[in-house]
Image: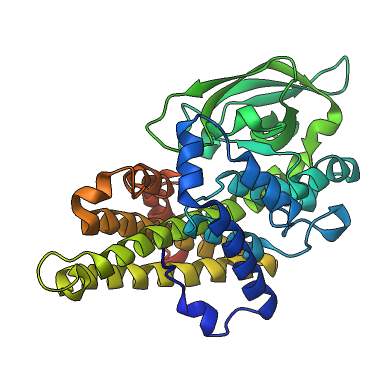
């Protein structure tokens, strides 16, 4: 299949190292591809072969500090990995969670012991972490999180109680980074805190949610019933949980943008190949503007979204958390819209063939909606931009 490559590459706006990384990951993705991905999903298995090879080659840990076995780069490089694997038809959703969210938070705020325990394994793919923030009654309002942690007077550790929902990959994760809340001794108010909960911890239970979504990573409800944790399970400073939380959420939005852009590129490439060769009248259907123009528009919108994604990654890697927050939300919004539109247009271009298993596009209709819903809905991003960027009054 012809790859619809970005003009961004040839414009020399990426460094030589990043262009080399992009080409290397593109080569890896081409060795697996959409057929491997769909066959794995249909068999009810996980993309372990691809994950492990990506780890051995150093791609999973490009953002992890070198002293812990990583590449010492940033979210800019990790987003390239996810985008190119997605463009090859085999996105790794846990790249958003394990190295991007959990790896970033632990690298920035974890203790030396936590870094030694988790970062090398995250970098080489031998360990995976999930991330638990969403709750059934909280939705987009993270201030309503009810998972609470209280000190255990007998051990000096923590007792964690609550429930999480739509948590990806808990079954294959060695631990889950749980967002809970502790009581501020001065004000009595609850404040966010992050805890590492290993999968075999007593009281930590999970149940799969049936989803109409073709993905190797499954979704789970998580139940925490007075889960006893050691004091060292707390990540970072108990009084700086909100800062630490957003240190993980900004990379999550940037990586979700990469997920959507990669998916859109794959769908567009499939449609372009088809439009070049499918002949109904006297010429290929791609010669007709009714077919060509929507595909050109999809390409333009994907490129624009990609530029905003790279701006957000640049700001984050430069340490501008506030600027990155604004750009990451915009990038996630733009990429989700562009990716979903590209997939829809690709299916429409192929007509009936767009709904067949042979071309692998129909299953992407559902997957492409994920970026518009999670990790934050498009409406909440519009709320953020209207309030934070434009200075309009809050509606909530």
Colour mode of the rendering: rainbow
Residue 368 in the image, given as x and y percentages of width and height: 38, 49
| Residue for point 66% across, 79% down | 15
Q: Nearer the viewer, residue 348 or 335?
A: 348
Instruction: Tell me if residue 375 can be seen.
Output: no
Residue 344 in the image, given as x and y percentages of width and height: 28, 54
Q: Nearer the viewer, residue 228 or 396?
A: 228
Residue 151 in the image, given as x and y percentages of width and height: 79, 22
How many numbered tags mark residues here? 0
Quadrant (top left/top right/bottom left/bottom right) for the N terminus: bottom left
**Is residue 51 toward the left or the right of residue 32 in the image?**
right
Residue 19 in the image, given as x and y percentages of width and height: 62, 75
The quadrant holding residue 298 is: bottom left
Q: Nearer the viewer, residue 172 or 184?
A: 172
360 shown above or below 84: above
Quadrant (top left/top right/bottom left/bottom right) for the C terminus: top left
- In this view, the residue farthest toward the left is 281
The quadrant holding residue 231 is: top right
Instruction: Tell me if residue 220 can be seen.
Output: yes
**Is residue 248 toward the left or the right of residue 233 in the image?**
left
- In this view, the residue farthest toward the bottom is 11
| Residue for point 70% across, 66% down | 319
| Residue for point 76% across, 50% down | 123
219 shown above or below 331: above
| Residue for point 55% across, 71% down | 311
**Is residue 305 toward the left or the right of residue 317 in the image?**
left
226 shown above or below 349: above
**Is residue 107 toward the left or the right of residue 346 in the image?**
right
């Amino acid at each position: 299949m012809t790859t619809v490559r970005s003009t961004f590459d040839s414009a020399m706006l990426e460094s030589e190292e990043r262009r080399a990384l992009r080409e290397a990951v593109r080569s890896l993705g081409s060795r697996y591809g959409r057929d491997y991905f769909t066959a794995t999903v249909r068999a009810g298995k996980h993309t372990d072969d691809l994950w492990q090879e990506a780890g051995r080659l150093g791609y999973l840990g490009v953002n992890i500090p070198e002293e812990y076995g990583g590449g010492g780069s940033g979210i800019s490089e990790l987003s390239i990995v996810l985008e190119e694997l997605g463009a090859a038809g085999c996105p790794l959703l846990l790249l958003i969670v394990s190295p991007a969210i959990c790896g970033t938070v632990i690298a920035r705020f974890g203790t030396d012991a936590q870094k030694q325990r988790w970062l090398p394994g995250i970098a080489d793919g031998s360990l995976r972490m999930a991330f638990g923030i969403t709750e059934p009654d909280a939705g987009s309002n993270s201030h309503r999180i009810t998972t609470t942690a209280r000190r255990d007077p007998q051990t000096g550790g923590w007792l964690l109680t609550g429930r999480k929902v739509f948590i990806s990959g808990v079954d294959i994760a060695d631990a889950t980074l749980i967002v809970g809340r502790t009581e501020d001794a001065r004000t009595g108010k609850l404040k966010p805190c992050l805890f590492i909960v290993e999968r075999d911890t007593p009281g930590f239970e999970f149940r799969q949610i049936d989803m109409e979504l073709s993905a190797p990573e499954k979704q789970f409800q998580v139940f925490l019933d007075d889960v006893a944790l050691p004091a060292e399970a707390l990540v970072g400073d108990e009084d700086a949980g909100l800062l630490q939380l957003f240190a993980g959420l900004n990379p999550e939005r940037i990586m979700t943008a990469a997920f959507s852009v990669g998916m859109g590129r794959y769908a567009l490439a499939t449609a372009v190949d088809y439009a070049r060769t499918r002949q109904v009248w006297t010429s290929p259907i791609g010669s007709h503007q009714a077919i060509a123009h929507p595909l050109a528009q999809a390409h333009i919108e994907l490129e624009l979204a990609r530029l905003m994604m790279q701006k957000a990654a640049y700001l984050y890697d430069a340490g501008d958390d506030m600027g990155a927050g604004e750009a990451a939300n915009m990038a996630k919004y733009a990429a989700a819209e562009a990716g979903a539109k590209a997939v829809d247009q690709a299916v429409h271009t192929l007509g009936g063939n767009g709904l067949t298993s042979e071309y692998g596009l129909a299953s992407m209709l559902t997957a492409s909606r994920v970026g518009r819903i999670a990790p934050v809905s498009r409406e909440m991003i519009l709320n953020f931009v209207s309030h934070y960027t434009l200075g309009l009054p809050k509606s909530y």
